[in-house]
Structures are given as structure tokens and as C-alpha cells.
Image: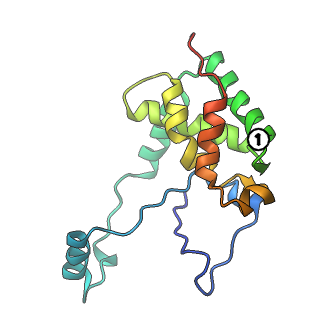
Amino acid sequence: MVIATQNPADHEGTYPLPENQLDRFLMRISIGYPDRQSEIEILDVHAGLTTLPTVRAVATAKQVESMVQAVRTVHVAPAIKSYLVDLADASRRHPGVHLGMSPRATLSLLRASRARAAALGRNYVIPDDVKALAGPVLAHRFVLSPDAQLQGADARAVVQDVLASVPVPTTR
């Protein structure tokens, strides 16, 4: 399991990853800057200290494997699978997208949706799981068309546009 950080691309030493490498990251989540009080707390706690000696594991490898196995048991109805494939198709045909969802992206969205359902105490995926995670799972994978880039399009807005273009399944 890898959790990575990426600085803004205009900082020296940071280079954009190729599309095939970006497609291997499950999600991209922007956390932004801390609020004023939190940043003061960071200064108070970490100004002269290293926290590395105090970092402890929050789960064992066995516990992580158990969670992975539990998520794999979350049911995905055929209608949800069709919805995922319809989203992929719509992303590939969207005029603002040069490269849409790969099969790996579709699979990642399914897996993330299962994990969300499990985290919320359900043993089945609903369309809201898919919709809630589409931005973090898909936006970094889309390569916008040159025209869309020239118009200042945002990949997250394009994801929302793709979601809006595909009917949500209403049957089980």
C-alpha cells in the first residue's frame, strides 16, 4: 500500500506522471492547507521535534488483509456494473476528453465503491457510492482534449458532466 504526496507541478523538481502511471493510483484527494488554528498547533507540536519515533502502526498486516477480504464480499448488482461500464463509455465519448476511463479505472471505481459501502456498514453498493467517489477516482485519469484545456476545463467538472450524462440505475 502506497500513500504519496504530490506538490504543485510548478515547483522545481516535480514532474507530471505519464497517464499510464497515473492510472495506477486509486484516488487523488486534495487536502489543501490547514486552517489557521491547525497550523499554529503544527508549529507548537512539531517545531523542534521529530515524530518518527512515536509513529505506531494503526493496523497489522493481518487486519488490513481482513479488511480487504471483507470489502471483496460487498455485493455489486449487475445494474451497478452496467452503470460503471456506461460511465466508462460516456467518458470515452465525451467531447472534452481525449483519454477517458480505462478498464483499470472502471475496476478501481468498483473497488472504491465497495470499500465505501463497507465503511458505511452496507454489504452492497448503491449508485451514490459510485457518484461520491467518481471525482477522486477518475479526475486524475482523464486526459482532457486540447480544446477543453484551452477553454480552461477542469477534470473534476468533466467527471460531473459524465455522471450527469448517464442515467442512474433504479432497479436492483
**Residue drawn at the location 69% of the way across and 44% of the way down:** 105
**Residue 26 shows up from this direction:** no
Q: Position of residue 8 (x, y in %)?
A: 56, 74
Left or right of residue 18: residue 38 = left
Question: In the figure, residue 152 lies in which quadrant?
Answer: bottom right
Q: Which residue is mark 1?
A: 94
Mark 1 burial class by Cα count in 10 Å: few <14, some 14-19, many 20+:
some
Q: Position of residue 102 (x, y in %)?
A: 76, 44
Look at label 1 and name its amino acid: His
Left or right of residue 77: residue 145 = right
- Which quadrant, please, contains the C terminus? top right
**Residue drawn at the location 53% of the way across and 25% of the way down:** 127
**Residue drawn at the location 57% of the way across and 41% of the way down:** 134
Task: Indicate whether 18 appears above or below 169.
Answer: below
**Residue 155 shows up from this direction:** yes
How many numbered callouts? Answer: 1
Q: Position of residue 86 (x, y in %)?
A: 72, 28
Specify the farthest residue to the front.
Answer: 151
Q: Nearer the viewer, residue 156 or 138?
A: 156
Q: Nearer the viewer, residue 136 or 65?
A: 136
Task: Indicate whether 166 appears above or below 142.
Answer: above
Q: Nearer the viewer, residue 101 or 61?
A: 101
**Residue drawn at the location 63% of the way across and 80% of the way down:** 14
Determine whether the residue tagged by mark 1 lies in a helix, strand or loop: loop
